[in-house]
Image (tube, rainbow, N blue to C red):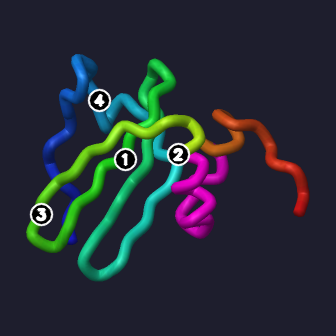
């Protein structure tokens, strides 16, 4: 599945630009992909694509963004995570 070419999304009076945001986590399977980003202003949003190239964009709270990453730990962009949230404690 190819990534969508759409780059800017307007939600609630704010613009969310993929190219200007920091990717934090990505989840993929055969029919669906979702990438979590943090905007330059610190807001979190997830862009989802399905097999029919339908795009869904959702704004998330910081808590929901962390939940997304907890549910998809293999997809976390480690350097970006540490830069934004700091080094996590050893488990």
Disc number for residue 65: 2
- Disc 1 marks which residue? 46
- Disc 4 marks which residue? 16
First reached walking from the N terminus: tag 1 or tag 3: 1
Q: Magenta segment, which residues?
A: 65-79
In the rendered structure, the answer to whether residue 60 lies left or right of residue 58 reads right
First reached walking from the N terminus: tag 4 or tag 2: 4
Q: CA distance from mark 1 to mark 4?
A: 10 Å
Instruction: Give SS at disc 2.
Output: helix
Q: Determine the image quadrant of residue 19.
A: top left
Instruction: Give SS at disc 4.
Output: strand
Quadrant for the C terminus, please.
Answer: bottom right
Instruction: Give SS at disc 1.
Output: strand
Marks 2,1: beta carbons within 8 A: yes
- Disc 3 marks which residue? 53
Above or below — where is 55 with respect to 45?
Answer: below
The residue lying at 56 percent from left, 36 percent from top is 62
Total labels: the figure holds 4
Q: CA distance from mark 2 to mark 1?
A: 8 Å
In the rendered structure, the answer to whether residue 75 lies left or right of residue 31 reads right
Indicate the position of residue 65 as horizontal and vertical percent values. Answer: 53, 45
The residue lying at 14 percent from left, 48 percent from top is 5
Q: Residues within 10 Å of mark 4 (few under 14, many from 20)?
A: many
First reached walking from the N terminus: tag 3 or tag 4: 4
First reached walking from the N terminus: tag 2 or tag 1: 1
Q: Determine the image quadrant of residue 33.
A: bottom left
Disc number for residue 77: none
Secondary structure that dominates the magenta span: helix
Q: CA distance from mark 3 to mark 4?
A: 19 Å
Q: CA distance from mark 1 to mark 3?
A: 15 Å
Q: Residues within 10 Å of mark 2 (few under 14, many from 20)?
A: many
């Amino acid at each position: 599945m190819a990534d969508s070419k759409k780059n800017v999304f307007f939600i609630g009076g704010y613009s969310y630009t993929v190219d200007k945001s920091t990717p934090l986590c990505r989840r993929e399977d055969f029919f669906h992909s979702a990438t979590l980003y943090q905007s330059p202003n610190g807001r979190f949003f997830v862009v989802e694509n399905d097999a029919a190239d339908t795009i869904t964009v959702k704004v998330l709270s910081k808590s929901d963004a962390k939940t997304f990453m907890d549910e998809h730990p293999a997809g976390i962009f480690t350097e970006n995570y540490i830069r934004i949230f700091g080094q996590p404690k050893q488990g």
